[in-house]
C-alpha cells in the first residue's frame, strides 16, 4: 500500500460526522464541535433521523457539498459500524475513524460486529482508524478528531505521536503542550484493525512537518511490518519508543489491547535494533523526542559527552546518570584543559565534567572549547537561571558547529525558567528543565547516534554453512545426540562423542575419545537428565565407567552417550526462536539461574552483523563475563556471530522447527563449544 | 547537642554580613541584598574597610543594634574565615554561614585554612553551616541566605530540603515552586565541617511547619549519627532520600565532596532500614516528598493499591510501574466488583485496575467503593482533565476515611491542569501530573508504610550465642579450619571435619566422617585454594584419598583438611562488615559471578529482626532462590536472622576484626551450612 492512502484520513478535503447527536453531551456531538474548528467542511449526519436512515443521509451529505467528503467519523454503536463503513465507501469516502468500543475485545456479540467491520474494510478498501480510539489531531490544520476539548490548546509543531492508546496520545500531546512544544500529528490507534503503527510511520516518513516521532506500544500484531517501518523511518528522522508491559498486567492489558503474543523484552530489543531510541516512561519519551526533533548527533558507536555545569551538585547527578547508561564522559585532552584553565577560576574541576562555578561572561568560550575537544561528540550544559546569564543565548554565541550538538539543562523559578525556554526557542537551542532530564536527553541522542552507526553495518545475508534444505524434526523429537549432530552439520562445534548401545561400545568409546568423559542416558523424552541421575561426569578409568553405567542402567538408560568433557569456561545460552509476532530471532543470555531470574538477555532478528553481536554483549548486565573477565576467556565476536546466523539460517529454512536452544554454549580458551542442545518442533497451526 | 543550637542559624534575631562588598556584583553584596528582605535586622561589615579592620567592625555592628546579632554570614576568602569566626564568637554570635570554598577540598594551603576553621569552631562552640555552600532559606521568614535571586519566588510551605549541595538545594526548591509547593526550610550543607545532615534533621523533627523532608546525600561522614537522626525523624514525618553516586564519578565527586568512604548501595540500604523512602532521581524526590507531606498510609508490609483510571492507556503505564516496584494491585472482592458493576458501563475492566471510561458523575461513588475494599490500603486515581470533571473535587466528595489515602494523577493542557491543581489545594487532595508520577507517589507512600511497619519490630539485642569476649585474630590470620571453628563457637553450622598432619590421620578421618569427603590444603596464606589445585572433592574410598593426598602434596600442602561434603543446595554469601562510615553491617547476596556483577546484595545494620531479614530477601532480585524456587530448599528466616546477629555480635565484640565472610553459606534441605569462611583483621588505624 502507499502512504498516500492515509491522506484522506489525516488531510481530508471534507468530513462527515455520522452519529452527530442533538444532545450536546453525547460523544457524537462533542466530536462534531471539535471538528467544527477545522478549515475543512464538516457535514453532520444524525443517526437518530428516522425518516431517511443513515444510508440516505450519508448520500445526501456527500452530494450537498462542493468539497469532496473523503473522511467519515463514526460515532455510532458497534452494531451499526460495518454498515456505515460500507455506505461511506459506496459514497466515495476513502477513510474512516471508528470511535466505538464493543468489538472483539468485549467478546460476545462484539466478535461478530468486529468480523463484520473487518469484512467491510476488506471488501471496500476504505482505510479505517480504530475501532476503540479517541481519535487523532493535526494542529496545523486545526483538525481535531478528539473527544477531549483541551486538544484545542495543542500547538502546531514538529513532534508526531503514534500511540497504541487514545489516552496516551492525549497524555503525550498535553505534556508537549505544557513544555511549549508543538505537535505535527497525534494519533491514537485503538484496536488498529486496519490502520496500524506501520502505516502511520510510513505516512510520517513523507510528512515534512514531522521532525521526530514518539511511538507508544502496548502490543504488536504485524511485527515484521513494524520493524520495517521503524527501520525506514529512523533513517530519516528520530523515532523514540516506549513499550508498556514489563510486568505482569496481562489480564488488564488483554481487556484493553488483546493478548500479548510476544514479550516486552523482545519488542524493546527489536525496536532498538530497527533504529528506535527506547525509553522507560512517558516523561522520558517527551524529553527525548523533543530534543531529538531539534538535533541529531553524527552516527557513533559511543558518543563522548562533554558536561559543562554551573553547579557541582546537579553536575554529579547528570554525570552519575550518563555513566550509568554506559556512556562516557571522556577526560578532555590536556590542551583543552589548558585552555579551560585560562577561562575558569582555579578551584573548579575542569577535566570533564567541567565545573564552571557560577557561569560568567566566559561561558560561551568554555562551551566552544569543550565542543572542540576531539573526544566530544555532544555537549550537555547545565546551570541555574541567573540574572547575569542567558544560557541559551550563551550557547548560541558560542557558535559551535552543528556536528557537535549542544543540549541545555536549566532550573529556576517558574518565570525565569519560562524566559530561559523562550530564549532557547528564539536561539534555536534545545533545552530541558532539570539535571535528570538533561541526562535523559543526552542519553537519547547518543542512543540514536549508536543505532544509526549500527545500521550502517548491514548483515544482508545469513552465514554460509546453513542447511541447504529444511530440517525436519523426527517423530519423538531430536535426542541430545541428534541435536548435536544437527549443530555439527551447520558448523557449530560440539564435544567428541559416541552413541553406545552396550557396555562394550561404551568402553571402546572411552578408549577412543580418552578420559575424562561424561556418560549420559540418551532418551529424547527426558528433558532434564540430571534430575533423574542420568548424567555422570569426570569418568576416566574403565572401572569408573562400569560404575557409571551401572548407575545409568538403574536410572532406566538403554542407550548411552559417551562424550569428551569440555574444558572449564563461561556458560552462555544461545537460542534461535521463531517469535510468534516478529518471526526468527536469536537470543543471547548467560547460563545460571541468577541471569535467568534477572532476564538478562539480548534479542535480535537475523541476520546479525558482528557489530550488532558486540552491541548485544554490551547490552547484557553480565556481558563482561565474555570479555576476558578476571583473566577468563574472551569471546570471538565473529565466531559468536556465526553461531547466531547459522542457527538463524536453520530456523528460516525449516518451518517445522520452532526453536533451537544451545544451553550451555561454553566459552572456553579454545573457543565456543555446544555442550547441550534442544530442538523444539513447531506445533501444528 | 540540642537541636536548639540551630535556632540562631535558621531563626536568628539579628544578622551581620561580613564581606558585604560595595561592588554590587560581588557575592557579599548579592547575599546582603537577599538577606535585606528578611524581617530580621541585617548589619553589613565591609571586609575592605582598612581603617577599623574586621574585628572592630563586627564589634561595632553587634553593639549598634537593639536586636541581638546571633548569625554571621561570611563572604570572605578562606584565608580570613577562621579569624572572623573567632571574632564573631567573641561578640556573642552563636551561628555562622561560611560560603567560601578553597578549604580542604582544594588541597594546598586550603588544608591549613580548613584546620584553622575547625579549631575555631571547636574552641568557640559557634555552630557553622558550610564552608562551600550557597546557603539556606526559610521562606516564611523571608530569610534568604542565598546568592540565587530566584529564591525570592519560593513560597512558604511544609516541605523541607536538606541537600548535600547548595546547587541541589536550589534545584529542589525551584522544582517545588514550579509545582506550586512551598518550602519550610531549604539547606545546602556544603562541606559540612560542623553542621551536618543529622543536626538539621534533628532540628526539623521539632519544626512544626515541616511535614516532610527531602534528603540529598552525596557522601556521609558520621554514618551512625545520620541513621539515628533519620530513624527518629521518620517516626514523626516522612523522609525521602536521593543518594547520588551509583556509578563511578569518583574523581569529580571527590573534588566536590571529599572521598566516598562507604558505598552507594550501603548508604541506600541503611537509610531505607532507618525509615527513609529511597528514590532514584530529583524528579521522584520532589513528587514523593510533596505527596508524603500531605498524607501517610497506615504502617503495612505490603500496601494494596486500588487503581481507578479514566483512560486505559495511562492505567496500563501506572499498573506496570506499580507492579514492577513489587507492589500488588489486589483483585477486588466480588462484592466490590458487584457494586462497581452498578456504577460503571459494562465494557470496562473493573477488577483492579478499575477502568471507568470517561469519568462521569458516579466517579466519587466508584472511588469510595474501591477504598472500602478490605484489600485496599491506598487509592490512586487518574484521569485527563475534562470540562465535566473536577477530579480533586470528586475525591473530596467521595468522603473517604483518611486511613485509606487517595492520590490523584491528572493530565491536561497547561491551564486546565493548573485549575485542577488549584482545586486539589482547595480540597486538600494530593495531586500530581502524569501517570508515572502517580505511580511514583503511590510507590513512595507504600515504601513509607513498609518502613514504619518494619520499624515496629525492634530487634533490640544481638542474638545470644555471640562470643563472651573479643575474638583476636592471630598473627598470620585464621586459616579455614580456625575460621570454621570460630563459626562453630557462635553456633553457625559447618561440615564435620578433621585437621590432619599426615596420611594416617587423613585415613582415620575419612573412616570416622564417612565419605564422600572434600580434602583441602590448609594454609592461611593461600586465599584461593582451588586455583592452585588445593581442593579435591568427592573422595569416598581409601585409594581415592591416597591419590588426592598425593596431588595436594604436589601442590605444596603440609597440612590437610578432611571434611564432609555438604548436600547440594543454593549458595549464598553472608558477611558481617565494619563499614568505615556506618559501623557494623551484615550483607546478604547470592553466590555466583552473575549476582556479583549485578551487585545484588542487601545490607543492614545489626541487630536484624526476622521481619527485616524477610525484607532483605525481598529486596534481592534473586531472592526467589531462597523461597523454594523450583522445588528447591526454603530458607528458615529465623535461622538466617540468627546467622546475621551472631556474626554481628562477633564483629561488635571484636575490634580486631574488620570482616567475616561466609562464602558460600549453603542453603540445603537440612538448613544453612557454612562451607567456607574468611576472617579479615582490622588494619591498624
Image (cartoon, coloured by chain):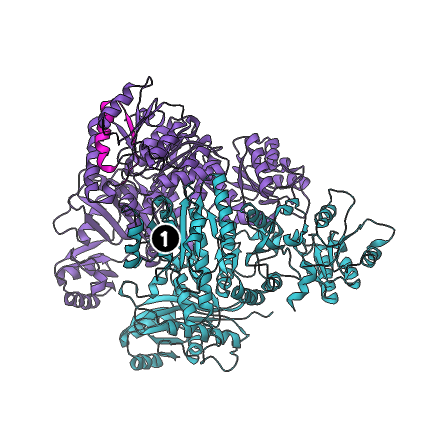
Chain colours: A purple, B cyan
Q: How far across and down, in percent of the image, does residue B642 sit?
A: 42, 75
Q: Residue placed at 26% from the left, 21% from the top? A: A60
Q: Chain of mark 1?
A: B
Q: How far across and down, in percent of the image, does residue A605 sit?
A: 30, 40
Q: Nearer the viewer, residue B484 or B215?
A: B215
Q: Is residue B548 magenta?
A: no
Whether residue A282 is visible: yes
Q: How far across and down, in percent of the image, does residue B645 sit?
A: 45, 74
Residue with the most extreme right position: B51
Q: Residue placed at 46% from the left, 74% from the top? A: B459
Indicate the quadrant where residue A7 lies.
top left
Mark 1 lies on a secondary structure that is helix
Relative height, residue A213 to residue B249 (above, below): above
- Residue under circle 1? B365
Relative height, residue A195 to residue B452 (above, below): above
Whether residue A302 is visible: no
Specify whether B78 is left or right of B241.
Answer: right
Which region is colored magenta? A77-101
Specify whether A670 is left or right of B446.
Answer: left
Point out the image quarter for the N terminus of chain A: top left
Amino acid at each position: 500500500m502507499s502512504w498516500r492512502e492515509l491522506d484522506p484520513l489525516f488531510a481530508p478535503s471534507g468530513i462527515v460526522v455520522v452519529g452527530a447527536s442533538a444532545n450536546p453531551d453525547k460523544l457524537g456531538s462533542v466530536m462534531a464541535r471539535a471538528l467544527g474548528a477545522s478549515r475543512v467542511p464538516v457535514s453532520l449526519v444524525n443517526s437518530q433521523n428516522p425518516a431517511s436512515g443513515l444510508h440516505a443521509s450519508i448520500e445526501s451529505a456527500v452530494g450537498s457539498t462542493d468539497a469532496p467528503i473523503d473522511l467519515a467519523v463514526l460515532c455510532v454503536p458497534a452494531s451499526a459500524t460495518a454498515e456505515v463503513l460500507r455506505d461511506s465507501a459506496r459514497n466515495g469516502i476513502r477513510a474512516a475513524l471508528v470511535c466505538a468500543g464493543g468489538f472483539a475485545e468485549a467478546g460476545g456479540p462484539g466478535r461478530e460486529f468486529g468480523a463484520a467491520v473487518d469484512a467491510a474494510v476488506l471488501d471496500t478498501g476504505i482505510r479505517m482508524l480504530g475501532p476503540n480510539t479517541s481519535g487523532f489531531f493535526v494542529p496545523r490544520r486545526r483538525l481535531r478528531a478528539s473527544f477531549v476539548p483541551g486538544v484545542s490548546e495543542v500547538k502546531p509543531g514538529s513532534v508526531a505521536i503514534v500511540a497504541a492508546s487514545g489516552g496516551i496520545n492525549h497524555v503525550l500531546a498535553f505534556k508537549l503542550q505544557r513544555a511549549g512544544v508543538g505537535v505535527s500529528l497525534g494519533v491514537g490507534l485503538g484496536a488498529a484493525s486496519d490502520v496500524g503503527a506501520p502505516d502511520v510511520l510510513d505516512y510520517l516518513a513523507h510528512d515534512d512537518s514531522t521532525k521526530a516521532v514518539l511511538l507508544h506500544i502496548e502490543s504488536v500484531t504485524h511485527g515484521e511490518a513494524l520493524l520495517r517501518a521503524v527501520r525506514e523511518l529512523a533513517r530519516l528522522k528520530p523515532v523514540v519508543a516506549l513499550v508498556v508491559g514489563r510486568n505482569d498486567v496481562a489480564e488488564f492489558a488483554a481487556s484493553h489491547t488483546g493478548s500479548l503474543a510476544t514479550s516486552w523484552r523482545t519488542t524493546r530489543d527489536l525496536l532498538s535494533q530497527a533504529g528506535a531510541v527506547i525509553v522507560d516512561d512517558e516523561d522520558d519519551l517527551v524529553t527525548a523526542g523533543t530534543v531529538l526533533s531539534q538535533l541529531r548527533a553524527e552516527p557513533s558507536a559511543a558518543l563522548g559527552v562533554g558536561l559543562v555545569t554551573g553547579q557541582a551538585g546537579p553536575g554529579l547527578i547528570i554525570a552519575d546518570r550518563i555513566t550509568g547508561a554506559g556512556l562516557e564522559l571522556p577526560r578532555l585532552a590536556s590542551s583543552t584543559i589548558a585552555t579551560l584553565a585560562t577561562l575558569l577560576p582555579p578551584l573548579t574541576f575542569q577535566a570533564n565534567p567541567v565545573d564552571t562555578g557560577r557561569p560568567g561572561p566566559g561561558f560561551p568560550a568554555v562551551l566552544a572549547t569543550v565542543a572542540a575537544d576531539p573526544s566530544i561528540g555532544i555537549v550537555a550544559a547545565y546551570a541555574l537561571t541567573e540574572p547575569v546569564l542567558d544560557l541559551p543565548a550563551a550557547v548560541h554565541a558560542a557558535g559551535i558547529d552543528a556536528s557537535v550538538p549542544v543540549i541545555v539543562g536549566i532550573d529556576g523559578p517558574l518565570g525565569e525558567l519560562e524566559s530561559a525556554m523562550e530564549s532557547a526557542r528564539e536561539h534555536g537551542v534545545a533545552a530541558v528543565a532539570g539535571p535528570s532530564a538533561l541526562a535523559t536527553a543526552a542519553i537519547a541522542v547518543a542512543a540514536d547516534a549508536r543505532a544509526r552507526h549500527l545500521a550502517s553495518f548491514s548483515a544482508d545475508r545469513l552465514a554460509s554453512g546453513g542447511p541447504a534444505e529444511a530440517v525436519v524434526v523426527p517423530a519423538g523429537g531430536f535426542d541430545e545426540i541428534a541435536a548435536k549432530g544437527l549443530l555439527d552439520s551447520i558448523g557449530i562445534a560440539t564435544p567428541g562423542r559416541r552413541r553406545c548401545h552396550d557396555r562394550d561400545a561404551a568402553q571402546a568409546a572411552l578408549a577412543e575419545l580418552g578420559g575424562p568423559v561424561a556418560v549420559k542416558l540418551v532418551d529424547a523424552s527426558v528433558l532434564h537428565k540430571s534430575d533423574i541421575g542420568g548424567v555422570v561426569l569426570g569418568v576416566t578409568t574403565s572401572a569408573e565407567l562400569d560404575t557409571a553405567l551401572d548407575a545409568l542402567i538403574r536410572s532406566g538408560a538403554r542407550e548411552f552417550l559417551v562424550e569428551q568433557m569440555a574444558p572449564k569456561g563461561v556458560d552462555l545460552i544461545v537460542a534461535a526462536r521463531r517469535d510468534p509476532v516478529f518471526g526468527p530471532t536469536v537470543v543471547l543470555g548467560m547460563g545460571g539461574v541468577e541471569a535467568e531470574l534477572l532476564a538478562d538477555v539480548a534479542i535480535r532478528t537475523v541476520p546479525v552483523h558482528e557489530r550488532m553481536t558486540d552491541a548485544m554483549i554490551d547490552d547484557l548486565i553480565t556481558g563482561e563475563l565474555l570479555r576476558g573477565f578476571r583473566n577468563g576467556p574472551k569471546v570471538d565476536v565473529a565466531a559468536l556471530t556465526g553461531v547466531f546466523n547459522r542457527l538463524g539460517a536453520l530456523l528460516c529454512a525449516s518451518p517445522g522447527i520452532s526453536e533451537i536452544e544451545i544451553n550451555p554454549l561454553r566459552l572456553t580458551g579454545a573457543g565456543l563449544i555446544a555442550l547441550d542442545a534442544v530442538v523444539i518442533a513447531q506445533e501444528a497451526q
